[in-house]
Each structure stands twice: as C-alpha cells, then as structure tokens.
Amino acid sequence: MIRAENLSKIYGNNELRVTALDNVSISINDGDFIAIVGSSGAGKSTLLYQLSFLDEPSSGELFFLNEQTSHLNQTQKARLRLNELGYVFQDYALLPELSSIDNVALPMLMQGMKTSLALYKSKQALQRVGLAEKTANFPSQLSGGQQQRVAIARAIAHDPHVIFADEPTANLDSASGRLVMDAFVELNKEGQTIVMVTHEEEYANYAKRIVTMKDGRIVLDSMR
Ligand SMILES: Nc1ncnc2c1ncn2[C@@H]1O[C@H](COP(=O)(O)OP(=O)(O)OP(=O)(O)O)[C@@H](O)[C@H]1O
Ligand SMILES: [Mg+2]
C-alpha cells in the first residue's frame, strides 16, 4: 500500500546535522496494524511523518499504491493526504466550538461533500469508535479518551487507506488509553490499516506488527 525505499531524513547542517532517518526501507501492507517503537529520539515520529506524506524525506522514494510519489507537487500531495489518508495526533486537535459530529464532518465538508452525506458518514464513524451516544457533545463535555476517539472517527470517516497516529495515548490515563487501543483493534479487524507510534510496550502489544527503531534505523520488524 505504502512502500518506502531507502528513506533518509537529515535535519540541520554542518555541526548541527542530525540524521533522524538513516536509509530506511519498509512496506505497509493492506490490513497491517503496525506499532513503531523505540526510545526517545530513535526516529519514530520522523519515520511516521515521511510515510504519511506530512514531511519530505531528504532522499529515498515513497510509493503509494505502487505509484512513485516524488513527482507529485504540493497540491497533489495535499489531496493525497486529505482523500486517501487519516491522521490522529496526541492532542486530539478538535475544535472546541463544534460538536463531535461536526468535528468529524468538517474535513469532508471542506472537501465539498454534501452535508447530508458527510453527517451520515460522521455518525457511522462515531458509532464505529463506540461514541454513538455522544454525537451532540462538545469536546469539553467528553473525557480525554472520548475526545481521542472523536479524533479517530474524524480520521476514518472518509475511508482512508491508512490511518497514522503519533503517540495517540500520550495524554491519556491507562484506562482511557486501553479504550482507544480497543477502538484501533476493532477498526483493524474491520480491515482498517493502521500505523501507530508509541513508546509504551503495553500499547504496542495491541498491534499485529512491531517495528523497532534505533538511531534512525529499523532494527527489528516482527509479526506478533
Ligand atoms: N525539526 C527538527 N529539527 C532538528 N532535529 C530534529 C527535528 N525533528 C527531530 N529531530 C531530531 O531527529 C531525531 C529523531 O527525532 P524523532 O522526533 O523522530 O524521535 P522519536 O523517536 O519520535 O522520539 P520521541 O519518542 O521523543 O517522540 C532526534 O535526534 C531529534 O532531535
Ligand atoms: Mg516522537
């Protein structure tokens, strides 16, 4: 689905030069549930950002559905991110003045989808993460774990090929974190491909495939 060949990412220059990603090759396959693990500074977020087209690698090639992507311009990449991929961040990034369903619908409305269809898809997505009863709640009326599940609903509502999550449980207590992971497991069972960064082993164990990074390289890639 997404294939990376010899990706490198170098920040800064001269004595401030940091090789955050060092010749990494990896394939994300249909149906994968991947946890990217490793210590702080290992390059986990950097890898996720390159694989999800949020950033530009310094060198290497990324293939999306077997097509080379280096020739895509910024507009085409933005379209790919909006239409084909989904993102979950650790701070949820919900708009406080919008209800759950409106938060989920907003990106699709901005893409020009008809309101009735966007609301229908949003309701379905909220159902899939166990929040059917909370469609009218505002973020301030939800727990952290529920807010993160709204963010997951927003990431999946447009049926993306892959959803990417960087430390989605970082701001949650362990009970809420487990509920978020349960939602990922359910979505993955339904066929959703997921790539998640975490530094907590407990959460990595929900994934089916664990990619371990060290010093900008993948040192282990194993199925559980
Ligand atoms: N924008 C940047 N400018 C300069 N160096 C950066 C930048 N982003 C990351 N780095 C460096 O690249 C390396 C990898 O960082 P990255 O954020 O990918 O690590 P990580 O594995 O996600 O760590 P953490 O678990 O702390 O989030 C680190 O040495 C970091 O300091
Ligand atoms: Mg990180």
Image: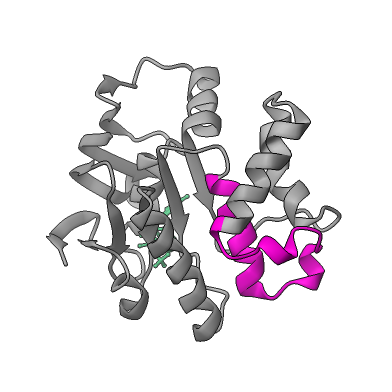
Which quadrant holds residue 49?
A: top left
Q: Is residue 96 left or right of residue 147?
A: right
Q: Nearer the viewer, residue 134 or 184?
A: 134
**In what quadrant of the picture does the C terminus appear?**
bottom left
The image shows residue 74 at horizontal and vertical percentages of: 52, 21
Q: Is residue 15 left or right of residue 129?
A: left
The image shows residue 194, relative to residue 26, as above or below, that is: below
The image shows residue 158, relative to residue 73, as above or below, that is: below
Q: Nearer the viewer, residue 191 or 151?
A: 191
Q: Which residues are magenta?
A: 128-156
Colour scheme of the rendered structure:
one colour
The image shows residue 72 at horizontal and vertical percentages of: 42, 17
**In what quadrant of the picture does the N terminus appear?**
top left
Residue pictured at 69% horizontal, 36% vertical: 118
The image shows residue 127 at horizontal and vertical percentages of: 60, 57
Is 1 in the magenta? Answer: no
Q: Is residue 24 left or right of residue 74?
A: left
Query: Can residue 13 be seen from the camera position used here?
Result: no
Query: What secondary structure predominates along the stretch shown in magenta?
Result: helix
Which quadrant holds residue 218?
A: bottom left
